[in-house]
Amino acid sequence: MNQLHFPILSLITYIPLVGAILVSLMSENNKKMIRFVTFSVLVIDFIVSLPLFFYFDPSTYHMQFVERVPWIKSMGFQYYIGIDGISLFLVLLTTFLTPIAQLSTWSAIDKKVKMFNIVILLLQTGMLGVFISLDIFLFYVFWEIQLIPMYLMIGIWGGPNRVFATMKFFLYTFAGSVLMMIAIMALYFLNHHFTGVYTTDMVQLMKTPLPLHLQMWMFIAFLLAFAIKVPMWPFHTWLPWAHVEAPTAGSVILAGVLLKMGTYGFLRFNLPMFPQMTHEFASFVVALSIIGIFYGAFVAMVQPDIKKLVAYSSVSHLGYSMLGMFALTQTGMEGSILQMINHGVSTGALFLTVGIIYERRHTRLISEYGGLASLIPVFATFFMIFTLSSIAVPGTNGFVGEFMILLGAFESNHIYGIIVAFGGLFSAVYMLTMYKRVVFLKVTKPKNLGLKDMNKREWAYMVPLLIFVFWIGIYPNTFLSKMRVSVEHLLNQVNRTTVNVNTQESRLQPITTVVVKKG
Amino acid sequence: MSGILLFVILAPLIGFLINGLFGKWTKPYAGVIASLALATSFILGLFPIMSVLNGHIVEYSYFTWLPFKEVTVQFGLRVDALSAVMLFVVTFVSTMIHIYSIGYMHGDKGYSRFFAYLNLFVTSMLILVLGNSYLLMFVGWEGVGLCSYLLIGFWYEKDTASDAGEKAFVVNRIGDAGFTIGVLYIIYYFGSATYSNVFPRVEDVLSPAAATIIGLALFLGAVGKSAQFPLYIWLTDAMEGPTPVSSLIHAATMVTAGVYMVARSNAIFSMAPIAQEVVASVGAFTAFYAATMALTHKDIKRILAYSTLSQLGYMFIGVGIGAYWTGIFHLMTHAFFKGLLFLGAGAVMHSMRGLLSIDLMGGLRKKMPQTAALMVIASLAISGIPPFAGFFSKDAILGHALEFGHPVIWVVGEVTAFMTAFYMFRFVFTVFYGEEKVPGLYHELHTHEAPSVMTIPMWVLGIMSIIGGLVGLKIGGHIPFEHLVTQIAPNTEIPNEKHYSELILIGTSVTMGLLGILSAWLVYIKKIVTAKSIANTFKPIYTLLANTYYVDEFVAYCIVKPFWWVSEHLLWKIVDVKIIDGGVDAAGWLAGRLGLLFRIFQTGFINQYAYWVTLGFIILSGWYIVKII
């Protein structure tokens, strides 16, 4: 079955589901117990996921910890799950971040606690399902399932504009999903057309060569779906809305995990399945990414609301990730994956930081703060470190990721590297300006005077993030060594037919011709 | 040895961790702990330095930091002749300034935080100079920038201090982009960023064009970090930080990192005459330009800041013309005397309760005799009067400029030397000589000499300002310092090197220095012409200088504000909210409207549906009939 002889991935995925059932049986009034049980379930889930890291074999690109059971035989659907060096870290990031996010809600969420915790547990199952699915149908199921808890989380526990924000979030992502579904169906039938087999096995589908004009349409459909999810410029406008209205835990999970589904989607679908189109579209995606990097930074700079600022900074940071990916070089792609983890850690931490002061003051406006350094120095220190990580100061995780992306982009085209090298300037501008206005200067608002510094629970969820900031910054090999072979394989897939791209004249020939040829 | 070398860096890091994590409890001893950490680092550093003086290169790798496909970067430290000089200067001057700070920062509420940052700074600076690859240098490079940011904004409640810190960081990031690009090219060409893999192969691998691009990109980094024109604008604002910070970071060590980096990259620059020309010209221009601004300023720290810019310009002349050792030599002597000048200014501020304007001072010599004596020593050193330290290094730079065929730069350098002597002695004469300008002020402020915890480190630097230049004295046909540094950073070979009588070269330099002092004496002591009348005679020039050429205003109103305005009003409020998001909403709205349209048909009344069905039937059959006919 797999190296552990044990369905570990299913276990990780469904522990939260069992937890949700457990919590649903508990009394609504026992809030403490609900929180504690949920947290315990999530921590157990995290602990159970650790063997993935230790038993992961970094020397192969083949899927590991595989479970494979036929599901709907007549249509070729399977319950097929497994991970490689790319999804490994996204699974771990999810199991790592969710308990942290949940811990931050112990005092922040006080209404409908039971339901909230059920939602968070269901969300966890949905998110993990996306990253482990190797069956395209299963993937789609999880992809849609995880939308619902997030929709509820923003819609019920969000801020004043939560309904509008959550509708926008849902419909926008859903519009992308519909396109993806069409592409998935096309893929399914075309695969049958060319190979005679009905299958939804992703690993198989990656091997099916498709005519270029069909690749193009499917590539575009997937591109749109994932670009909205990432979000890439100019499909990003749902993100500030969602972040601003979402409760802290929602923002953490949204930024930390949900956005990564978009980038992950590119790695699983666009790149390996449509290699020629990947090359064709690379410079276009890179252009959007570079625009996103700078545009996100410029717009972040002028935001009056801290959460909005961090939201726009996500647009910028994920621009880096997309740039590294579509540089189509080993280092760029590894950097892109590392940047996903980094963004989860740093931006997650920044949202938690904002959450800490929001909980005390119920405002996210930068102008409502100032002088926090003298009032709550411990908070100020944590905030500083995550700020530095976000602006990629060497020694922190941000630097390693961004530098790898720069290196990869530079290798792909010098101009990309040269332009983006100046990106660090603007991230410093928006983060430090915000930090200055919030933490430095004099205390101008008397309301801030009574602020309490971080409590033990807050320490407990910030310190693990802090450890990763420095771990990845100082010894990234722990992470890079596990993804190397998988990324190499992915690049081989992308490059497998590049030789033909330039010689193939018949790119736009009608489908019938292709069919005739094949037949 | 590998452990010793590692501990050179770890000692201040441990100091940082102790004061940073347990500052609440270590507060009374924070200064002592930090100074001890630094002293340990200094003493341990002597071992590799001795080894280098015996002709070895000490290099160790500790662990793999960045394992990329294109390049693998080790965390490795290297002490060779070049980094040995830096190691000595950094640990020595830092130790002195740490001790001085015990007195200077006494009673500040952020006492332990201050020393934590200071230790962290030294750690970063040591990584910068000892790292054996460009990437490790970059770690230190950004690290010192970060500490500079934290220390400039140390008194964060002051908005000027917080702004200045941010400005320093941001302006430096422009330079960092250049540095990054340079490193990307180096990795691209060499597949490595480690010095020992790069430099021996430079001539085989790089074309002159590539060397020029790399050189210019790296130099952009140096322009930022070492505050050369036009990225110098952060340094004067950086004076908002506590004075020991100005002394250590913004005079003696960090700002010289760019000079070190250019000297380190000598193999690349020596292949790129255009890049060298740019380095030397920017240096010469900054030297002159900054000196003019120092002439009119009234704030004692800012005078010294402009002076630092100007002296850094000299260093870049040295490394730019290809006589790398002269730049490093001036870097070292400058660390002594400029460090001392800032400490002296700090002592004055300390006893004047933070007052900075020279208009309020005068005759301080009587109150602070030791400080006054030290300031005169340091000023003589910076003015290039023999046998003080600055004389040897400045003369080496200017002499080589002429010999290596840069007469214009030589002239600029000599004129600047005159201005340097003038503005420094303007400072000395107005502050320490003459009479008290505001009667009773000193009494009221209890102006007094600094405590010995401050004066002793100053005296140590004072002694170094006197004798520190002697390593540049020609002994037995060669100059010891040149001999040492050229092992690692050999002079660029100049095809037709000219030779001039040393007596003329030295004579010119010394004359310029003495003339400057004499003019200052005539104006500020003898008052043959008053400064005011000079200012009135050259009113437009004076106004321009006194306002530092309006550069800050230009940057604020022509770059920063428009940029901010465009981002807010165009990009955010129009492009993002109205166009992009508006487009998304419009799509949603359209879908809704279409729904409304179709709703008209969905009334729920059977008879209406029957009506539509009938209508459809008629139309379709009509169409069918027409088609048949």
Image (spheres, rainbow, N blue to C red):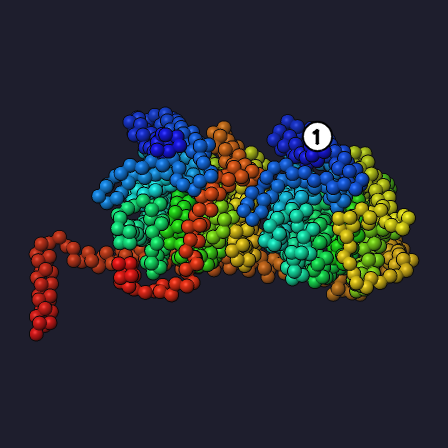
- In the image, taking residue B556 as reference, residue B629 lies left or right, namely left
Residue B518 vs A119, above or below: the answer is below
Which residue is located at x 11 percent, y 69 percent? B623
Farthest-out residue, bottom? B629
Query: Amino acid type of disc 1?
Result: Ile
| Residue B447 shows in this picture | no
In front: B582, or B138? B138
Relative placement, left or right, of A21 versus A246 is left
Residue B140 visible: yes
According to the picture, the residue beneath numbered tag 1 turns out to be: B33
How many numbered markers are drawn? 1
Left or right of A466: which side holds A208?
A: left
B26 over B259 or under it: above or below: above
Please state the chain letter of the residue tagged with numbered disc 1 in the rendered image. Answer: B
* Residue B138 % position (x, y): 63, 46
Residue B308 screen position, x and y as percent: 75, 51
User: How packed is label 1: few (under 14 Cα within 10 Å), some, or many (20 or more)?
Assistant: many
Q: Nearer the viewer, residue B162 or A334?
A: A334
Under tag 1, what secondary structure? Answer: helix
Q: Quadrant of the C terminus of chain B?
A: bottom left
Depicted A464 relative to depicted B439: above or below: above
Q: Residue at x 39, y 56 (%)?
A: B581
